[in-house]
Amino acid sequence: MTHGIQEVVGRGMCVGCGSCSARTSGAIPVTIGRYGVYQASLEGASATDLAAGSRVCPFSDDSKNEDELADSRFAHLPHDERVGRFHSIFAGRLTDDSRLMGSSSGGMTSFLLAELLRTGRVDGVVHVGRGDDDAMFEYMVSTTPEQIIENRKSAYYATTIADIVERISGDGRRYAVVGVPCFVRAFRLLADELPALSEQLSLYVGLVCGHLKSKFFAESLAWQAGVAPDDLESIDFRVKNPTRRSSDYDYAATAKAHSEPAVRATKSAIDGSWGYGAFQPEACNFCDDIFAETADVVFADAWLPQYLDDWSGTNIVLVRDAEIRALFDAARERGEITIDELTADDAARSQGGNFRHRRVGLRVRLADDIKAGLSVPRKRVEPGYDGVPRKRLALIRQRRKMSALSLETFARARDAGRLSVYTTPMRRAIRRYVVLDGYARGLVPLARAVAKVLRGKA
């Protein structure tokens, strides 16, 4: 049975990218749902619209997968099953410390986007930036380097490309588009369906993604810092702290009636660890693309031992376009950036947890759902439990439960106006996760100690 757009939406697996809406001129609308994630509605859509939407849905079997899209563009490049095809991989950062401080990591993403505009390679950049009162972050177009700098930094928030594609279509300009792996794939699928749009989209920029976040993530962080959801004016998800490692950053939440933000260590928040999967949409449980395999260039944090102690941050950059690599090399010659050559092994090692989730964990989730008689998409890993230890199986399943739990309990906490409606059950779930993680990693004494605490014996 084909897992098409109807199964995607029916199973709550829609990521809200909006490609179906863009392809059908709005016949399939995409709006924010109860859990703070964009969702497509198929009600009233014609069979023709459903078929068209399914061909551009990144979680539908009717769309081309990452290998098919990449092979049609990068077949001349070597392939690694972990990171996809690549021309070169390096670690880099800006040499100007004043510019580096305003970036989430090494500043390489905003540097490239600004350089593309400065050199005339593109007329505009389609990327996520600060939105209006209804959406704290949204897709926008920047046409100057200054606009890129104003809207740099990570945005862990629900967004959609539906409106921005309609806005740029047919305007005669060339664009670079930026997105996490499933969104880049959605842009590619749309371009394959719409020749005129394909002419406009001249460069695809990918961002390595642990998983997407509901807009609840911003509200939860803010609430824990003393700023209630309805009072939240703005949030900065990545504030560098010179007293800690680059992976141990702060966040800053600003209330509507205050000019000074509340600043707190991200790891001090109950949901600050990406490993817990808090506010992760169900779609992310069915993604196997880590290094945006359909993008021309990809950026990630350099979560490697040799870079972690540099609190100011370093990027890993994976390049599939030789002209883009030449642009970086020229910038290095001018002294604007540093470059350390890396291997595919280095890149994969920097995303160890991500690979466990999207490869090993995906095999288990697919097998679980098939066993339960549920429709699942075809993926590039085989469903099954072979080689997965019992404790790892339990950990994978617990993480999936936590994602669903976080969305449901935070929605209820918001309705009740009490953060504890979310934090109390989430803390219990996290404690169980920590125990299972200890066993899965072979840290038996630690796991037993935590288990004793949970049982009230310590």
Image: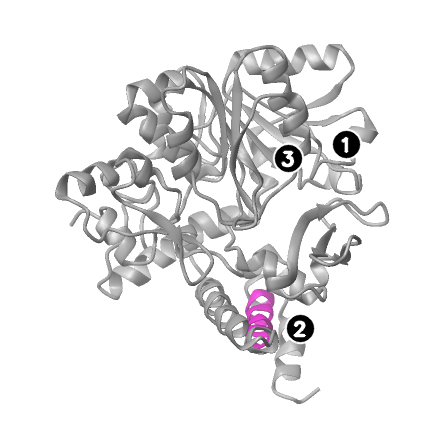
Label 3: how many residues lie within 10 Å, few (<14), some (14-19) or many (20+)? Answer: some
Q: Regarding mark 2 in the picture, which secondary structure is present there?
A: helix
Q: Where is mark 3, residue-wise?
A: 151
Q: Regarding mark 3 in the picture, which secondary structure is present there?
A: loop
Q: Where is mark 1, residue-wise?
A: 100
Tell me the residue at 42%/25% (across/down): 168
Mark 2: which amino acid?
A: Pro
Residue 90 in the figure: left or right of residue 322: right
> Is residue 409 inside the magenta stretch?
no
The Cα atoms of the two marked residues, 2 and 3, are separated by 46 Å
> Is residue 428 inside the magenta stretch?
yes
Coloring scheme of the render?
A: one colour
The Cα atoms of the two marked residues, 2 and 1, are separated by 42 Å
Mark 1: which amino acid?
A: Leu
Q: Where is mark 2, residue-wise?
A: 445
| Relative image position of residue 151 (x, y in whole percent) | 64, 35
* First in residue order: circle 2 vs circle 3: 3
Q: Magenta-highlighted stretch: main secondary structure?
A: helix
* First in residue order: circle 2 vs circle 1: 1
Quadrant in the picture for residue 333: top right
Residue projecting furthest to the right: 243
Tell me the residue at 81%/25% (across/down): 96
* First in residue order: circle 1 vs circle 3: 1
| Relative image position of residue 18 (x, y in whole percent) | 37, 41
Mark 1 vs mark 3, foreground winner is: 3
Tell me the residue at 45%/21% (across/down): 78
Tell me the residue at 61%/34% (across/down): 346
Residue placed most toward the observer, 158 or 275: 158
